[in-house]
Amino acid sequence: DAQESRGLGDVYKRQTMAWLRVGDNINTHPLMSRLVEACDYDHALKNEALGIFIALATSSAAHLTDYVVEPGLVGVLAPGREKQLMDVLRAATLVENYKDEKEDRWLYKLKNDVEFVHMRSKAEVEIDRDRTRDRRNPELTIPVRVRDGDQCRWCGRTVNFADHKSNRGGTIDSLNAHQESTVETLVVACRGCNSERKAGNEDFELRSAPMFPYYETSTINFINTHKSVSYTHLTLPTI
């Protein structure tokens, strides 16, 4: 239905965008103190160096380079100021020289600190993109939801696919990290179990698909009116 579609769209936007977080307490973080000292208490220089650091981090996050940036990017962002700014950033341990062994080139690697400036890794973004692609593919999700109904295949509790916030919300979970997904590698899961599995908790045992699946009325309406029904040939009896 419309509410379910809007929710999936919101999830897609959140999960597929490159993400950069600047810490709430960045001004009092020990790395900021190091930067002030490296700038010899020249606060204009400190602000300029911090600005270029965040600009480099933003570019790295956008291009999924995992904190590694090209030296030429500094010239693009701070022409004529490259040497002094990189000298103070290195002195503050915010940047270090990084050898790309494959291409035999020296690059820069930015400091990774979750409380200072932190970005999502390329691997995290790509698996989220694969996850979102699977969830938006009705040739996969409709058969999975028909097979499993509105019940988590991990804990067994009922789920609601219109709930996009609580642990009882319905999600599509993967048994193989969304690699070349098929109907057999995807299951219905509650948001709580799905989140715990994503966090690395492996203490879960997959339940068998229910012999008599339970469906919310909203699920029946969603599946029976979905345009994909014409080629999946799957419908549910109305209550």
Image (cartoon, rainbow, N blue to C red):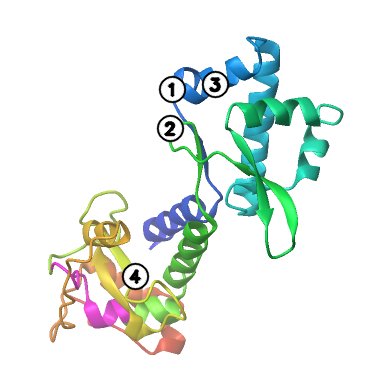
Question: Which tag is nearer the camera, tag 3 or tag 1?
Answer: 3
Q: Quadrant of the C terminus?
A: bottom left
The residue labelled by disc 4 is: 222
Q: Are marks 4 and 1 in contact (CB under 8 Å)?
A: no
The residue labelled by disc 2 is: 115
What residue is shown at x 77% (from left), y 25% (from top)?
84
Identity of the amino acid at label 4? Phe
Question: Which tag is nearer the camera, tag 4 or tag 1?
Answer: 1
What residue is shown at x 44% (from left), y 25% (from top)?
24
Question: The residue tagged with tag 2: helix, strand or loop?
Answer: loop
The residue labelled by disc 3 is: 34
Question: The residue tagged with tag 3: helix, strand or loop?
Answer: helix
The residue labelled by disc 1 is: 25
Residue 115 in the image: state x and y as whole percent: 43, 32
Residue 155 in the image: state x and y as whole percent: 14, 67
| Magenta span of residues | 144-155
Q: CA distance from mark 3 to mark 1?
A: 15 Å
Ranked by sequence position, the earlier of labels 4 and 1 is 1
- Residue 44 vs 204, above or below: the answer is above
Question: The residue tagged with tag 1: helix, strand or loop?
Answer: loop
Identity of the amino acid at label 2? Glu
Q: Are marks 1 and 2 in contact (CB under 8 Å)?
A: yes
Can you tell which quarter of the image residue 92 is in? Answer: top right
